Amino acid sequence: MTLTELKYIVAVAREKHFGRAAEACYVSQPTLSVAVKKIEEELDVKLFERSANEVTVTPLGEEIVRQAQAVLEQAAAIKEIAKRGKDPLSGPLKLGVIYTIGPYLLPDLVRQMIEHTPQMPLVLQENFTVKLLEMLRTGEIDAAILAEPFPDAGLAIAPLYDEPFYAAVPHNHALAANDSISSEALKAETMLLLGTGHCFRDHVLEVCPEFARFSSNAEGIRKSFEGSSLETIKHMVAAGMGVTLVPRLSVPKSALGPRGKLKPNTDEGFVRYLPFSGEAPTRRVVLVWRRSFPRYEAIAALRNAIYACELPGVKRLSE
């Protein structure tokens, strides 16, 4: 068996779907399926239970997948050792970013990287926290920008900034007349949430824990709705379907100016963004990488580029 074949079985175990695993590995599904079958025949074991709707890992398959992950990590470590002595700022840097950070940080970050380290282009991967951590451990990405908390065993972490939350309410809502808002005031509202898997969903439920029970049963459909992205949820707020919480960097610049200056023909003009009164709820955004990653200068350059971004309204942190 080869490292590539081990990568395939790890991807199938992660995605629980042959098509998505093939897409993640940039190969056709038949190629991946043949490779997985070859390993199963070589080991004379069944790694996966296949059904019409999903793929599950067998108990023995779980042990083999864990060992395959360890082998891939060691192989990545060998490559990283070989890179030592070379220019650490030369060559691509594979960076993962969670969905609720990427759209608001990456445009400015990419410009900063092109300006300051053009010899080190970013190869970007947007995904959920759990998947980015798996990709980090298997060497598919070099670093990731995440929001705490998450399981950090064996990873190096550098804090970047604390980002406050804002409430987003329809422009004609009674709460829109206020200059600020409290979590208590949100309890009676229909809360729009990100779908399961988004860590920001968990952050929102920490601020308004009473909505946790509404997001998991039929009765609660009247009290909470789910969207696939923050931008989708903002459109839902603009349509008057409910209220939500958003991270500060996702708030449009024009939406924080005098209300009379909002653009009337866009969703920005139909959404009012309110800071929290008193101590605002926040999330801590961090940069994460493998401790064995040898290009620390590349990590430092990336962190400097992040701090060179505008980052309005956040509290910058240092180690």
Image (cartoon, rainbow, N blue to C red):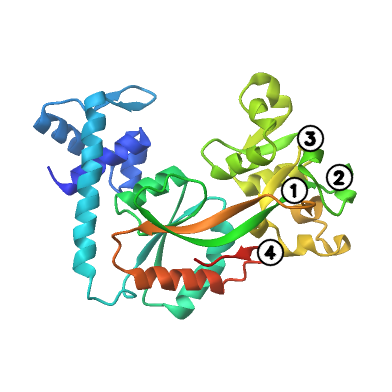
Would residue 289 be found to the left or right of residue 81 on screen? right
Q: Which mark is residue 175?
A: 2
Q: Amino acid at mark 2?
A: Leu
In the rendering, at what x and y percent does residue 313 appear?
68, 64
Q: In the picture, residue 22 is in which quadrant?
A: top left
Whether pointer 1 and pointer 2 mark residues with C-beta atoms closer than 8 Å, the reply is yes
Look at 46% across and 73% down and name the residue there. Answer: 113
- The residues tagged by marks 3 and 2 sit, at their Cα atoms, a distance apart of 10 Å
Of the pair 208 and 108, the residue shown nearer to us? 208
Callout 3 crowding tier (Cα within 10 Å): few <14, some 14–19, many ≥20:
some
Q: Is residue 280 above or below residue 223?
A: below
Measured in 3D between alpha carbons, the distance from the residue under mark 4 to the one under mark 2, in whole angstroms, is: 22 Å
- Pinpoint residue 154: horizontal percent, then vertical percent: 34, 51
Q: Between disc 4 and disc 3, whose residue precedes? A: 3
Callout 1 crowding tier (Cα within 10 Å): few <14, some 14–19, many ≥20: many
Residue 220, placed above or below residue 80: above
Residue 107's label in the rendered image is none
Between the C-alphas of marks 1 and 2, the distance is: 10 Å
Q: Residue furthest bottom?
A: 116
Circle 4 packing at 10 Å, graded few (<14), some (14-19), many (20+), is: few
Residue at 46% of width from left, 75% of height from top? Answer: 114
User: For mark 3, what is the residue?
Assistant: 189
Q: Which mark is residue 167?
A: 1
Dot 1 falls on a residue whose secondary structure is strand
Compared across the picture, whether 203 is left or right of 319 comes to right
Under circle 3, the secondary element is loop
Task: Please say if the residues under marks 3 and 2 sit with CB atoms less than 8 Å apart.
Answer: yes
What residue is at 46 percent from the left and 79 percent from the top? Answer: 116
Q: CA distance from mark 4 to mark 3?
A: 26 Å
